[in-house]
Image: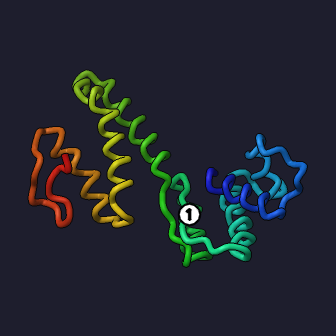
Amino acid sequence: MKALIFLTLVLFMLNQLPKWIPLHGLRNLTYLVCKRAIPKLAMEKEGLKRCLTKVTNELSVHTLATDRSIQCKALLRNKFPAISYQFDVWDFAKSVSKRLVAAGKASSCRALLPWIQSIINHLWWSAQTCNGDRQLLVEKWTSIVHYIVNVHSWTSCQKFHHCDH
């Protein structure tokens, strides 16, 4: 949905949408692009398809990040293969945080609660420092397991072998 809203804003800036539409109602812009003729479940995919079709006529789109939508991923793979598809780190971090908090509520996992913010920070750091290398991202992200048990170097990974602190 965030990517769709962003693309709708791009269309607005390219004067493709009427200027009288208030920018504070971005979700309404999404519905306008879809003209309310699409079932709600298919709206994100169809809206993204329409927006990308218009935007790619005017601009070169290299990368698109969304909220881990399977429909959007399939659309980009099939209709826009030149566009790199990535997950939005914010959405992923939010999901991981919710799961950790839920797990920490169990009496056997209360020790997890003080680590949650550090784990989420580590996820953000992993995404920011992987330079687009998927394997390095996974190795950095999973290295939190070593750090939590006070192990600061390891040989089990191919690209990331020790903590950077």
Q: Pinpoint residue 47: horizontal percent, then vertical percent.
A: 72, 60
**Disc 1 target residue:** 64
Q: Pinpoint residue 140: horizontal percent, then vertical percent.
A: 26, 54
Residue at image point 32% right, 59% down: 137
> Is 67 left, or right, of 105 in this rendering?
right
> Is 144 left, or right, of 8 in this rendering?
left
Residue at image point 51% right, 55% down: 68
Classify residue 42 by image quadrant. bottom right
Residue placed most toward the observer, 110 or 42: 110
Residue placed most toward the observer, 36 or 10: 10
Q: Pinpoint residue 103: horizontal percent, then vertical percent.
A: 32, 31
> Is 1 left, or right, of 35 in this rendering?
left
Residue at image point 56% right, 63% down: 64
Residue at image point 25% right, 21% down: 107
> Is 84 left, or right, of 20 in this rendering?
left
Residue placed most toward the observer, 137 or 50: 137
Element carrying mark 1: strand
